[in-house]
Structures are given as C-alpha cells and as structure tokens.
Image (cartoon, grey):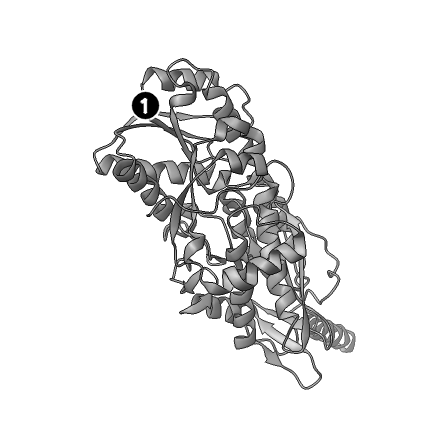
Amino acid sequence: MRRLAMVLSLLAIMAMVLAACPAPTAAPAGGDTAAPSGGDAAAPAGCTDELGCVEVAAGAPIRLAYMLVVSGPDGSLGIDARRGAEIAVAEKAELLGHPLELIGEDSGCNAEGGQAAAQKLAADQSIVAVIGTSCSSEARPGAPILTDAGFTMVSPSATAPDLTDPAKHVAGFLRTAHNDKVQGQVAAQFVAEELKLKSVATIHDGSPYAEGLVSAFTANFTEMGGTISAAEAVGPTDTDMRPVLTKIAASKPEMIYYPIFTASGGLITVQSEEIEGLGPTIKTMGADGLYSPDFLAAAGATAEGMYLSSPDFSTFGTDYAEKFLPAYQAAYGEKPTSAFHAHAYDAVNMVSAAIEAVAVENADGSVTIGRQALRDALYATTDFKGLTGNISCNADGDCADPKIAVYEITAENIAAGEVPTARIYPK
C-alpha cells in the first residue's frame, strides 16, 4: 500500500512538470526550425496580441522586407519598386529610435516564386511587415502563406481585381496600387471614346493580372458599344505567337489589346507585323506590365505608336517632381524604369506610420509590435498623404487613390530606352 502511494506521488509530480513545459511549436511552412537571425521567433513574454508580437531589442533594427521580382525579363518592374522603398527607408532612417532596415526576396513574377519567397519570409519572425508583391501571380499563393504566419503585406503593384474581391481576399493583403477594374475602364474609354474604335481583339497570358485586365476592358468596351472580335490566350513561355495572331487577323480587328508582360509582349509586337491583315498599321495597346525599358528593347521599332495605360504621374503632386524624382536619379543614375516606384515609397511610409501608432516602447529600449494591432492600424489608414494621392484603405485592402493615364510610345522613347511620361489621355 505504501509502495502504491509512492508511485502515485511520483506520477503526480511528473504530470505537474509536464504541464509546466510549453508544447513545441511547429516550424513555419517551408522554413527552418532554428530561430531566425535578427530577432526571436517566439512571441515576447506578456504579448497579448492574437497574432503574436515582434520584439525588437534595444538598438536593433526594425526590419521590413520586400517580396518583388528583381531579375529576369520583368525585373525592372520590381527593381523600380524596390528603389522607391529604399528611398523611403533612407529618408526615414530610423523609427522609434531604431534603425529602419529593408531586406527582401526575389519572387519571380510567377506563382512558384511567390510561394517560395513567402515561405522564406514567413520563417523569419523578426520581419515586421512585407512590401510586395510585384505581380498578382505572386500574391495569389504568397499572401495566404504570409497571412497565416501573422504577417501583413502592402503591395505597390499587384493590381488583379480578385486580390481584393471580398470572396477571395485574405486578411494580410493590402495595396497602394490601383485595382485593375479602374485601369480596364480607362483603357476601354480611351479606345471607344478617344480613338472611336469599334472592334478590338484581346490576348491574355493566363496570369491573374492579364486575365483581370482583359475582363475589365471587355466589360467596359462592350458596354460602350464595342465588339471583341477575338479573345485569345498565349502561354507565358510561348515564343511563336503567329498561330494566335493569324486567328486574330481573320477577325479583322482595329486594335489588339494585350495587357501582358515583357517577354510575351515583345514577341507579339514584333510578330504581329509579319501577319497579313495586321502588319504595321494595326493599332496596339498594353498596360503597366509593359511599361519598362525592357519592353522597348524587346519590341524595338515595332513598339512605335503603341499605347500603354499606367498610373498618371502628372497627378502625383509637387513632392514627386521636386523631391522624389531628383532623389531617385541621384541614387540610381537614371530615371524610374517602371510605374510603381511611388506606390512602393508610399507603402513603406504607410507601414512606418502604422508601426509608430501601435508599437510599445519598453523601459529597456526595446520595442514590442503586435501583429494584429499593426494590421488593424493599416486597415484604419485614412487620408494618408502619399506621393500617389490621399491613401485610405477599405475593408478588402484597396488603399489607392487611383489615377490612370494613357501614354504613346515614340521613336524617341525607343532610341533613348525610356518609357513615355507625358500622357496623351485624359487630355
């Protein structure tokens, strides 16, 4: 009887010890089980935020990360945005007495790259927030991964309508870029009302960006009395566009609208001139995915006269022209190479303001940032004065003050390798 009592006592002691030990936490998807450098992966003691907290030690940097395409044929899109973010970080220099730091991952402008980059960033719990993605195809897999890890991201250029559709939107995704419902409408108005065209053929590449823009353009153009003579698709790795272009020629359109990316866009522009019924006289139009010197190089002289829709830089205000652009050229030795540098600049400043609003400054010089509190502060952004306009976020993550213009590529643009910046529409 005495022996049984001893055994029961030992079992009770073991149960108390086990109860006092924390359960092991699962490693983030695709990540390392070791704590990342620069911070503690665990929530700090006393954190009551439902998504956890980032604890920044005294003197340590507050870390933001970018998730952008910075290599390959679409690299200029993300490099341009990264530069805008870098300028904002350099101007800010520090936040709450801590250095502000920007690290990042190349997300490739495709779903695979978006997934890999998101998994790598999610494994580093010292990152406070993410600036990204460049492309909507990266955001589709990447945004849910980061959301599930408690992160919040602000995209400067992922514009597909479904990313902020209430039925599909994930809580960790916001954007300072426009929704392509707006860009598609402006493009359709330009074609129908300014050019007075009645028949347009469309091409998309299967990306969320291109599909969303073609859908928005089609809905608006047909509502205005226009006809879509052919609706075609190409693969992102296709190199022979002639079969699709031959089909389009048979439908006798007045314009081809292809809001896609650099590699495919260059091939379509060049090869359309070889097709009887199209040739150099057919009008062509793309969107901000082709708004880069890389596209001008890929298409060469065949891009002359092509129309591109993109953010309207003339509405960005005096700070953009007088302060930001000189800083950009001084830092990088060239003019902006794509359309979303100012949106990335605004994203960093918007995130910084939200951090300042919610961070708790501790007596030892450290700072505690609640992830849910930060997310809530970002969604509460109202009339934030950015380069791109007054930024106010709705419940589905659309924050932009969207102003879209149409530009025409000239021979001078092609010779200089510089995208057009003087709008031709609206007049």
Looking at the rendered image, the quarter that the N terminus falls into is bottom right
Task: For residue 319, say whether it is visible.
Answer: yes
**Residue at mark 1:** 253
- Residue closer to the observer: 380 or 263: 263
Residue drawn at (50%, 50%) of the image: 157
Q: Position of residue 395 (x, y in %)?
A: 38, 62
Q: Is residue 32 above or below residue 208?
A: below
Q: Position of residue 41 (x, y in %)?
A: 68, 64
| Residue 14 image-quadrant placement | bottom right
Coordinates of residue 316 in the picture (x, y in percent)? 44, 59
Spot the residue most to the front. Answer: 412
Which one is nearer the viewer's eye here, 406 or 374? Answer: 406
Is residue 311 left or right of 322 when viewed as pictured?
Answer: left
Give the residue at the far top of this rendering: 276
Q: Is residue 235 visible in the rendered structure shown here?
A: no
Identified by mark 1, the residue type is Pro
Percent coordinates x, y for residue 109 in the rendering: 57, 41
In the figure, is residue 194 to the left or right of 55?
left
Q: Residues within 10 Å of mark 1 (few under 14, many from 20)?
A: many
The residue at 58%/76% (across/down) is 359
Nearer to us in this view, 163 or 387:
387
